[in-house]
Image (cartoon, grey):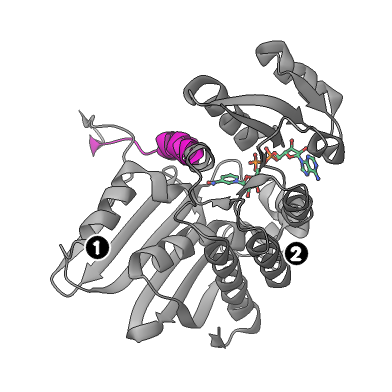
Amino acid sequence: MVKLGIIGLGTLGTTHAENIIYNAPNAELIAVCARRQEVLDEFNAKHNIKYSYNNFDEMLKNDELDAVLIVTSVNSHFPLVMKAIDADLHVFVEKPLALTTEEAISAQEASERNPGKILMTGYMRRFDPSYAEAKQKIDAGLIGKPIMFRGYSLDHDSGVESAPERGENNGAWYSEMIVHDIDLARWLLGTEAEDIRTIGGCYKHKEFEKYNDIDNACTLMKFKNNLMAMFYTGRTAPHGSHIETEIVGTEGILRISPVPRKDRINIYNKDGVLSECMDDYISRFGEAFKIEIQEFINCIEEGRKPEMTAYDSRMVCETANKAYEAYVCGELVKM
Ligand SMILES: NC(=O)c1ccc[n+]([C@@H]2O[C@H](COP(=O)([O-])OP(=O)(O)OC[C@H]3O[C@@H](n4cnc5c(N)ncnc54)[C@H](O)[C@@H]3O)[C@@H](O)[C@H]2O)c1
């Protein structure tokens, strides 16, 4: 039985914690850590976890633990990851690995100095059954050699209010979002970005401007071997959460969720033929989150490493930071 602790019991932390409790047969969530006592009380009223902490350092002293999950705000990822590596634990951290590239490199290096332990970042799209199958088909040569990646990551316009302010401490909303597509592009194209250009602006939510953030952006990257990638990252989708991916190859095209529909229902009425859209990322990637945490647990139990390395986590972070830098400076940026 793999014994886990978690810090951060917000929206996604609760999802990960409950996935361990209800869905992972070979793991036990033995410890939870949150800053506010009422958050712990509320969680424990439902789940009655063996150990509760207000302080991460105290949780790390618990020698029953094999691993920790870090699901806090982005600005705390790096210090918490470093402490958990120092405590000789396996670490799962939500994306991105760190706020700055320097921090991401330090975390990668710290993890590589401790090769017996895993450092895995939560890029859950890889674990979505459609993305996993697409990767297998691309690797099997179904569309020939990949030439171009195109990724759309559009958040629902609702709930936008807290995003700009949160970005002040946690990095631009744009960077938090584009990391997913950068992870997919590197994974599916099998190589690294070289040149980056980003254009965009605050077309609807001017409050992003205050923090030099973007509500809609288009990023173009040249990858090694002259491969191409296009990213559309937006925060104003009126129809729901729209995640769409395309890979163009020499012998065909593969698309994942070109229509981000919630189900297989079509409604025929006075407005036409309608299909509803995914509401949010948890509805779209609920299954992927379960598989992702199960893979982290299985890697620990079986003594193997996840496919996503600490180097991958660092490169995604670095590439996203360069893409944001390209927006700010308005010029082509080289990796
Ligand atoms: N994989 C995805 O698609 C995805 C989606 C949303 C969020 N995320 C990531 O998950 C993380 C959490 O996001 P969320 O939406 O659950 O946020 P949230 O604001 O709902 O929860 C974050 C929690 O962490 C706590 N926290 C923050 N800093 C802390 C610290 N230093 N020590 C202890 N607790 C701390 C906060 O009090 C809060 O309860 C972020 O890193 C975010 O980037 C990933």
Determine the secondary structure under disc 2: helix
Answer yes or no: is residue 323 visible. yes
Alpha-carbon neighbours of circle 1 within 10 Å: few (<14), some, or many (≥20)? some
Q: Position of residue 323 (x, y in %)?
A: 56, 74
Q: Residue at x 49, y 43 (%)?
A: 299
- Front-lying residue, 172 or 207: 172
Q: Position of residue 234 (x, y in %)?
A: 50, 58
Residue at mark 2: C-beta within 8 A of ligand 1: no
In front: label 2 or label 1: 1
Q: Residue at x 19, y 64 (%)?
A: 253
Judged by its main secondary structure, the magenta piece is helix
> Which residue matches tag 1?
139
Determine the secondary structure under disc 1: helix
Q: Position of residue 84 (x, y in %)?
A: 74, 48
Amino acid type, callout 1: Asp
Tell me which numbered mark, 2 or 1, is placed earlier along the sequence. Answer: 1
Q: Bounds of the magenta span?
A: 272-295
Q: Residue at x 55, y 87 (%)?
A: 334
Q: Position of residue 9 (x, y in %)?
A: 70, 32
Alpha-carbon neighbours of circle 2 within 10 Å: few (<14), some, or many (≥20)? few
Q: Is residue 295 left or right of residue 265?
A: right
Q: Quadrant of ligand 1?
A: top right
Q: Is residue 20 left or right of residue 154?
A: right
Amino acid type, callout 2: Lys
Q: Residue at x 36, y 70 (%)?
A: 190
Is 204 part of what is drawn in magenta? no
- Front-lying residue, 209 or 315: 315
- Specify the quadrant that holds the N terminus: top right
Cα separation, mark 2 vs mark 1, equals 43 Å
> Which residue matches tag 2?
210
